[in-house]
């Protein structure tokens, strides 16, 4: 398997962080009204664990991560090998104790994604991929690894759309323009991308005006290696490692067969919003 060592380091790091996160989770008192930008001690502890694990294996590599922690602050590497980490993606789901959060580690070499792992600690399910190595999933510690494939919907009206939890899910502009057959909701972007990669959903659209590399990188490669496509909302390639590790053109992930139709629908949505 290509990039085998990097993948194994990513898997080991996410699983070690997953165990640590669950220790915090088990003793956490739920925060029912947790805001979307909540950060916890578990985020910072898990990130430190992941980054130290990576640097033990690849001390010269560059780091990108969500939280300001000592190991990240000390890192000054300018290597073309970049690790992109979100220690708890969907911290609102973590704080509310509904299980909808993931640990994510992605690896980029010379601007191109080479490996990604998305772990759902609450149910201990991992989805991972390497460039040209396919996308795989396992359930339970030491569980059998099974290949993932995207769904087969060929019309937007047949699609399963995954999006963030909302009291007005059916009123979102994406739903209104695409009219999907069904809607899935979860707090974690990594989980949404894993849902597209596994065929549980067919489309995920991120229309936030700005987000970060760590929000999507690890999940991006899952979708592509499972046979799908991931682009900006306009259908352009997504670039990682830019200044500030920021994304400002949105993201569309699909099973591939629906991608062009979804891009056109999103263009129509943008036009309607301007009028």
Image: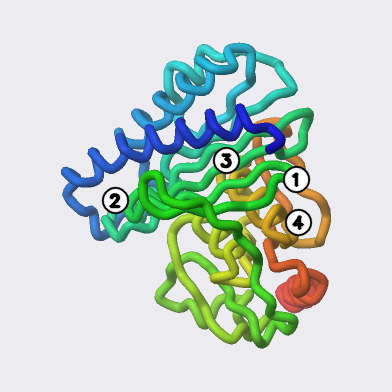
Q: Which mark is residue 231?
A: 4
Q: Earlier in the sequence, mark 3 or mark 2?
A: 2
Residue at mark 3: 214
Residue at mark 1: 132
Residue at image coords 49%, 73%: 184
Q: Please identify, in this view, whether the residue under mark 4 or under mark 1 is nearer the observer.
A: 1
Q: Are marks 3 and 2 in contact (CB under 8 Å)?
A: no
For this orientation, the residue located farthest to the front is 144
Residue at mark 2: 95
Q: Are marks 2 and 1 in contact (CB under 8 Å)?
A: no
Residue 216 seen anywhere in this rendered image of the structure: yes
In screen coordinates, is 168 left or right of 240? left
State the CA–CA distance, disc 2 to disc 1: 36 Å
- Choose between 10 and 31: the one closer to the eye: 10
State the CA–CA distance, disc 3 to disc 1: 22 Å
In screen coordinates, is 209 left or right of 270? left
């Amino acid at each position: 398997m290509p990039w085998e060592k990097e993948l194994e380091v990513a898997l080991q790091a996410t699983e070690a962080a997953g165990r640590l996160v669950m220790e915090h989770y088990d003793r956490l008192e739920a925060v029912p009204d947790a805001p979307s930008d909540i950060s916890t001690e578990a985020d910072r502890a898990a990130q430190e664990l992941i980054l130290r694990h990576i640097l033990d294996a690849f001390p010269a590599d560059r780091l990108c991560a969500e939280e300001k922690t000592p190991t990240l602050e000390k890192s000054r590497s300018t290597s073309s090998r970049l690790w992109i980490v979100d220690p708890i993606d969907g911290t609102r789901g973590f704080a509310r104790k509904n299980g909808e959060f993931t640990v994510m580690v992605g690896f980029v070499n010379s601007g191109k994604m080479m490996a990604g792992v998305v772990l759902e600690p609450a149910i201990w399910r991992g989805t991972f991929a390497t460039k040209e190595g396919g996308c795989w999933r396992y359930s339970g510690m030491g569980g059998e690894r099974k290949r993932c494939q995207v769904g087969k919907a060929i019309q937007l009206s047949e699609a399963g759309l995954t999006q963030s939890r909302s009291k007005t899910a059916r009123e979102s502009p994406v739903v209104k323009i695409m009219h999907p057959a069904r809607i899935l909701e979860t707090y974690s972007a990594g989980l949404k991308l894993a849902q597209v990669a596994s065929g549980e959903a067919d489309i995920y659209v991120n229309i936030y005006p700005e987000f970060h590399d760590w929000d999507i990188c690890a999940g991006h490669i899952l979708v592509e290696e499972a046979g799908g496509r991931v682009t900006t909302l306009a259908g352009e390639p997504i670039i990682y490692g830019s200044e500030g590790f920021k994304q400002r053109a949105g993201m569309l992930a699909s099973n591939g067969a629906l991608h062009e139709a979804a891009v056109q629908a999103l263009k129509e949505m943008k036009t309607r919003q301007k009028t």
